[in-house]
Image (spheres, coloured by chain):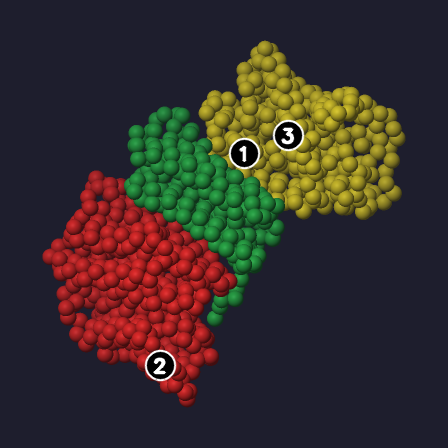
Amino acid sequence: MNAAYVAALQVGAGVVLFCAVMTLWRRGVRTIVSLLGVQGLALGAVALVLGLHERNAALLASGGLVVILKGVVIPGVLLRASRLDPLSRETRPLVNVPASLVAAAVLIVLSYVSSARLTSLAPSVATRLVPLGVATILVGYFMLVTRRRAVSKIVGLILVDNGIALVAYLLTSGVPFVVEMGSSIDVLLVVVVLQFLLLSMRRHSDVDALTERRELHD
Amino acid sequence: MTTTLWSWTTSLLQVVIVGVGSLILIGFMAKVKARAEGRVGSPVTQPLRDVRKLLRKERLHAHHSSLVLPFAPMIITATAVVAVWISPLVGTHPVMVSGADIFVIVYLLLTGSVAAALAGLDAATAFGGMGSSRAMTIGALAEPALLVGVIALAIQSGSSNLAVIVASTLHNSDHAFGPVHLFALGALVIVVIAETGRIPVDNPATHLELTMVHEAMILEYAGPELALVTLGEAMRLGLLFSLVANLFFPWGVATSSSAAALALGVAALVAKLLVLALVVALIEVRSAKLRLFRLPELLAGAFALSVLAIVMGLVTR
Amino acid sequence: MLLVTIVAIPLFMTLVTALNPWRAWIGRLSAAANVAVLILGAWLGVQTMSGARVAAARLLRADSLSAVMVLVIAAVAVLATSFSAHTMGREIDAGATTRRHARQYLLWLQVFISAMLIAVLSANLGVVWVCVEATTIATTFLVSHRRTSGAFEASWKYVIICSVGIALAFLGTVLIYYAQLHAGAGSTSLNWTSLMAVARQLNPAVTRLGFAFVVLGYGTKVGLVPMHSWLPDAHSQAPAPVSALMSGVLLSVAFYALLRFRAVAELALGPSFPRTVLLIVGVASLVVATAALIAQRDLKRMLAYSSIEHMGLMAIGAAVGSPLAVAAVLLHILGHGVTKAVLFLSAGEIYTLEGSTEISELSGLLTRRPALGSVFGVGLVSLLALPPFSLFVSELTMFRAEVDAGLAWVVALSLACLAVIFASVLRHGRHVLLGARERATPADSRGRATIAVLVVALVLVAGLGLSSWPLSPLLWHAAHLVTP
């Protein structure tokens, strides 16, 4: 077992979760989106490391795709959306920042405890890191639910996607390349759709008033 | 030399270096800050001179204070000295090293903090009470982060004894640069800044009511007791810095009982302390003090980083 | 060849729409294309009775279950696209929308239909997921077509909730793939056939987790409680043909994915776990929809909640897992799809002609516009599962299967809920349809044509209810495929 491979895999997966926790901590929207970019690069690095170790060309291609798409393109699209509001900061989340961070710590421990069954099916260096992916999913979901600003919610959604992608890489060395391509393009298109919605809503009136609207109800 | 002689020499060296050296360290940090801000600043040995000046003054006690006021400085300094005595700073085998458990060290430091807080309350002034409550709030948030962070290291090394952790990090260099150590380092740097009362948590040079935390607690002290408090606080800072330096960068620590190893250990400790002090001073220069209600964010972040370090340790075993 | 043609036709239409500006003939051509797909789907149904068809380098695969889904997708698509051609022209003339927006609408509609067809004809469960995600993206643009703040609010909620749900479905798919990789049989593709072959050797703990996520994830797209909150908003704010497609078919396509995974889970875990999970979400959906239908104020929201109710009934039917139950569920998919489409399209006509779909603002529709009113009324009768319509047959059969499986309490609960729903919908329908109003100007020839199409659809549903020939062998064959 190559020590460099093990170390690179562990650091990559650790950085993915670290970026997720940092997005809960920082408030500036531009900072959060940059963290998302770093996370995308780390995710791609994990795929590339796995691909090099297993000599899997499809995984290498998938890693390259992730680096470009989730590390560069998607944060770029989001930065453009946030440029409409350059000083935007998350000022009144539903759960304040210290409590969110403590909740993140709880979620991380929870994911470690609940992923034991997944690791025990096929223990290896990669599958032992699965709790980090599950924790990213939970942190992303938490962010989606507790943040008010539209861009923060989108970031939470992308965190969930990245977490699931990390779990897929660690458990099954990725999914068949067709599915991987489709999934990446879908994520990109979701971001584009959300960007389109934000722009259209902004033309109508203030964005966040619309994302918090409760006018459609019974 | 024999093991007992070696242990006693190690411990004595540690107390002397940390005792005198921390005061110089504080002066060094002030000098770095001054230079970075374009001033000349006071000389590096200024805190030593301040202590000497204070020792010559008369003892003054506030009117309504009790025995707590004169005893608290002794407790602060005594706990600091004991902690320095048994911690693996210069070598891995000081006296009573089996007692150098994480929990022992942390609770020794905590006893000192509680003594200081009680002293702040004792003089029955508004400033003292306010300082005590703020200091205890910061402490309550920083302690879990500190404990959890060091426990992450303990999980990796298999024991909560600090000397064992230092020795195991020395032996496994891949641990030293692994993700567990990285995250724990980040968390502990924040906690150390909080515990020693530096910017961005607390400004050690201010006496404004709005911004005082630690200074408010010791406002009522004068003369020799203030000198003792200053020494005790300096030793706590020195201890915390040395622990961070040795837990994460243990190279140079004396593991064998020879004079050469001890000399190397002393030199390494001094060098690491200077580097760490430089880093902290530069952080101080570059940041502004955080508003009090933003402190829970910072410390909760440190806590989250520590938990991250623990889970990383568990998944990378 | 057949499969490739079925997939190629809507893709070709997408290309045509993308390359041309808005023209009325494009809308009519797309309706004709969907008629062609319907005919081809019927032929596919005949073919797959004798075994599955594979095409396009094993990327596409059709068995009788896929054929049933193709039939329902094409049938509703015919209705929706012919209406779209009609309503878009009308809206452009009235200045309610621009040619550019109409063209985008038609383009995304075609993408939507193509994605659904590829989803049911794909061999790989991962590609099914990609297509269902693609439908989310396409329908978001469609839901926000009207560009009002209500439409934007609905599409924002829709895309966020469904994206999270779809992501969970992906996680479930990955977990089941992981179990498959370590089932020791050497098969490493996400194809449904290879998954079914090794299903008995899948690790139970991992499969349980994966199936739960799949139910949560695809259940979001089906509109099952507790992930249903996007449904009333999205289905009521979208243009009528889009609501028809979404309510009638998209929910069923996601349900199709659930059926496939349920078969795998039953082989791997035994019948009790999948049954319990599906029962919980099914009963919850039924109860929540019942409660919500009592005090509805808007016609389209009422229809949306009725969709949640029917999806709940179908989930309960799927929970039983016997061939009789699943055959009834498939019949229900067909009947509900066409009925819901008819209802949404007539609600759309009501909106255009009367200016509102608020129940309080409508009355006397039967006297004002007899043709439209009777179509809507008969549609409601069909929705309430009254004979002779096929929903009556499918619900009765599902209840019989549930009693056979020892779930008589579920039948009792369902009957109670259906009784409440019957009363609520009847009350709302009575308010809308009855009353003394003077007759409005009679519809023009195009309006008469659209009503005629809806009447034909209703007649078909009634015919299906009277005798499910020639579909019953196909339904039985399909049911046996997913009930091991």
- Give the red chain's letter: C
Q: Chain of mark 2?
A: C
Image location of residue A74, percent across then percent down: 45, 42
Residue denoted by label 1? B184
Q: Is residue C358 shown above or below B216?
A: below
Q: Distance of mark 1 from mark 3, alpha carbons?
A: 14 Å
**Label 3 secondary element:** helix
User: Is there a contact, CB below 8 Å, between mark 1 and mark 3?
Assistant: no
Please tell me whether residue B156 is drawn above or below residue C94 in the rendered image. above
**Chain letter for mark 1:** B
Q: Residue at x 42, y 36 (%)?
A: A68
Instruction: Name the residue rendered at 33%, 64% in the picture.
Output: C85
Residue ranking furthest to the left: C50
Q: Nearer the viewer, mark 3 or mark 2?
A: 2
Q: Earlier in the sequence, mark 1 or mark 3?
A: 1
Q: Position of residue C27 (x, y in %)?
A: 31, 61
Q: Residue at label 2?
A: C442
Q: Secondary structure at mark 2?
A: loop
Q: Return the x and y of residue B16 as percentages of the image width and height.
A: 70, 20
Report how many numbered discs are placed on residues in the image: 3
Closer-to-camera residue (C17/A30): C17
Q: Residue sitting at 30 percent across and 35 percent down?
A: A58
As displayed, is residue A214 above or below residue C200?
below
**Numbered label attached to residue B240:** 3
**Image chain in yellow:** B
Q: Nearer the viewer, residue B151 or B94?
A: B151
Name the mark nearer the viewer: 1 or 3: 1
